[in-house]
Image (cartoon, grey):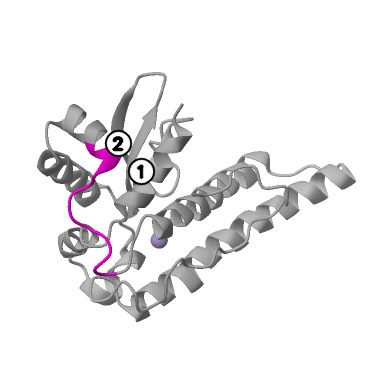
Amino acid sequence: MVKFMEKVRTFTLPKLPYDYNALAPYMSEEQLKLHHDKHHQTYVNGANAAFEKLDKAHQENIDIDTKAVLKDLAFNVGGHLLHSIFWENLAPSGKGGGVPGGAIADIINEEFGSFKRFKKEFSAAAASTEGSGWAALAIHPCVGRPLIMQIEKHNVNVFPTFNVLMVMDVWEHAYYVDYQNQRPKYIEAFWNIVNWDQVNKNLSFVK
Ligand code: MN
């Protein structure tokens, strides 16, 4: 899980918790390497560049295009944090997928009636996300029920302060090498490598 209270004032690309070839055949080494090393790195760099602009503006008391900088920052921070959750909620082939157990299974069954129904609804959210975006499972004690978020880009349609338990990246950059334009095939593959142990761990955030 992402550490939200880092003392350092910039972001760093996290290392993957498995080898680049660990998710094959569902996600190839080439696809994963490109996605992690290039795309995720770009969001880390983008967020840090926006931080730099803010630091300079604050230190030298100079005006900035506030709207543009904050918009850019929100997009890149969202991109970095969602990718950081995504890598963790994937597991090497043969070690993930299947039906969840533990507390997350109870939460899913209670809310959606069955895992099958949840999988269908989450997949539909992922398939119909407009343009580039994410499907996410999130929860907040204020309402005591899990919700599926359909995030556009990295930061649109997010429910503020909800805890994100699991995400699926449906940007084309996440699957184009392996599946070309066939997003549904990629979505189906995702269910073979989802790391339910990690999703259960992410629940510990929820008090
Ligand atoms: Mn991505």
User: 10 Å neighbourhood of mark 2: few (<14), some, or many (≥20)?
Assistant: some
Say whether residue 139 is left or right of residue 65. Answer: left
The amino acid pointed to by label 2 is Ala
Which residues fall within the magenta stretch?
Answer: 93-105
Choose top left, top right, bottom left or bottom right for residue 157: top left
Q: Earlier in the sequence, mark 2 or mark 1?
A: 2
Is residue 82 at least partly visible in the picture?
A: yes
Ligand 1 within 8 Å of the CB at mark 1: no
x, y (%) of residue 68?
61, 45
Say whether residue 182 is left or right of residue 57. Answer: left
* Residue at mark 2: 103
Relative depth, front residue between 111 and 173? 111
Q: Element under label 1?
A: helix
* Residue at mark 1: 200
Ligand 1 quarter of the rendering: bottom left
Q: Residue furthest right?
A: 60
User: 10 Å neighbourhood of mark 1: few (<14), some, or many (≥20)?
Assistant: some
Is residue 62 at least partly visible in the picture?
A: no
x, y (%) of residue 130?
27, 48
x, y (%) of residue 22?
34, 75
Q: Contact, CB < 8 Å: mark 2 with mark 1? A: yes
Q: Element under label 2?
A: helix
Choose top left, top right, bottom left or bottom right for residue 86: bottom left
Query: Is residue 118 covered in magenta?
Result: no
Choose top left, top right, bottom left or bottom right for residue 175: bottom left
Ligand 1 within 8 Å of the CB at mark 2: no
Say whether residue 67 is left or right of residue 193. Answer: right
x, y (%) of residue 147?
29, 32
Calculate the distance from the C-alpha at mark 2 to the C-alpha at mark 1.
Answer: 6 Å
Secondary structure mostly seen in magenta is loop
